[in-house]
Image: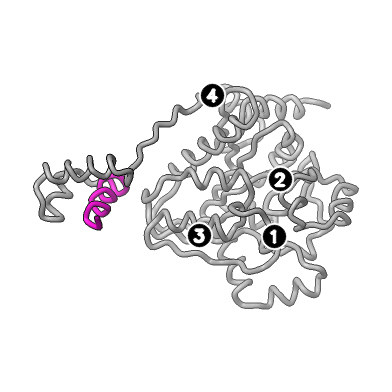
Amino acid sequence: MDQLIDIATRFYVTGQSQIEIARTVGLDASTVSRYLKRARDEGIVRVEIHRPRSLHGDLALELAQRFDLKRAVVVSGNSGAGAIQAVARAAADYVNSQLFNGMRLGLSWGRMLSAAIHMLPPGTVSNLDVSLLHGGVGSAGAGIQGVELARHIASLHPHSHVHYLHAPVLVDSPDIKNAMLRDGSIRAALESAASSDLALVGIGTLHETAPLVRYGHISPKDRRRLLAAGAVGDMCTRFFTPEGVPVHVLDDRLIAIEWDELGRIPLVVAMAAGLEKRDAILGALRAGCMNVLVTDETTARAVLKAAKRP
């Protein structure tokens, strides 16, 4: 069984040919072929074929030119649950094409980011250095927390390392924040995040169902303060208005990289879908802290229409 798994891993994950495997493990090629068939027959290897949604090139180009993006990826079709999965798939495909050995990778957290990361294929590069862009320890739903996503993406790529940020995203007072930032491990984790080559982020809202609100990372009182200041969304828990103006009312209590640090990361890939994200996406685009946006056609059209309003 161990040899069966080893041969299947070499063929399906690392991309070795059957002849290369035969030479390495000391078997003939026909035996390797039989092992691979047995791995499929016994369910050790499962092959899935995904029919990708087509991409809307003209709309993507219009978005990229309008907001000075390096690239926009727009999935064709209507919005909805299917579109969210399609956007996650498109984001995973794009991110996978940008990874390289030894890359420093910064991660946010949330539902869309979780969906995209869990669609990444294993083993394409190695030695990733993974950091968290903001805190998030707490009662967030299973599967979307930064520590879980960082651990998962590191497990896909051999010899990768995670800089864990063991801190909540929002603390009770500026004094607590200052004390936490004096901790060497927390300070080192944020410094590592700020030096990322690539950042993967979602675009959040202040809707009651948003993870930040739903799971109590920000209190009802703090949500009211943000809304009163004109905030419509966030990236890495840095809030902004529909015009892209930063909202600083919680900054003295946030454990997260700064706006200017996010802006200095060479490649920031943001992903979001759904009409309820329109104002947040528009604000994030105007804030100028992303290079790439991945979204769906209906949302892209709504964002461009809103951007043209006087």
Q: Which quadrant is home to the C terminus?
A: top right
The numbered dot on residue 204 is: 2
**Picture coordinates of residue 156 (x, y %)?**
42, 54
- Cα–Cα gap, marks 2 and 1: 17 Å
Question: Is mark 3 in CB contact (under 8 Å) with mark 4?
Answer: no
Q: Secondary structure at mark 3?
A: helix
Q: Residue visible at 60% across and 30% down?
A: 83
Identify which residue, 228 or 10, lies in the foreground: 10
Indicate which disc, 1 or 3, sits on the residue closer to the N terminus. Answer: 1
Disc number for residue 57:
4
Residue 124 visible in the displayed image: yes
* Labels 2 and 1: the sequence-earlier one: 1
Question: Is 17 above or below relative to 73?
Answer: below
**Residue type pointed to by label 2:** Gly
Disc 1, SS = loop
Which amino acid type corresponds to the residue marked 4 in the rendered image? Answer: Gly
Tag 2 secondary structure: strand
Q: Earlier in the sequence, mark 2 or mark 4?
A: 4
Whole-number angstrom distance, CA of label 2 to CA of label 4: 25 Å
Tag nearer the camera, 3 or 4: 3
Measured along the vertical axis of the image, is residue 65 above or below residue 135? above
State which region is magenta: 1-15
Residue where numbered disc 1 is placed: 139
| Residue bearing the label numbered 3 | 151
Cα–Cα gap, marks 3 and 2:
22 Å
Q: Nearer the viewer, mark 1 or mark 3?
A: 1
Amino acid type, residue under disc 1 in the picture:
Ser
Q: Position of residue 293 (x, y in %)?
A: 60, 38
Distance between the Cα atoms at labels 3 and 4?
A: 34 Å
**Label 3 vs 4, first from the N-terminus:** 4
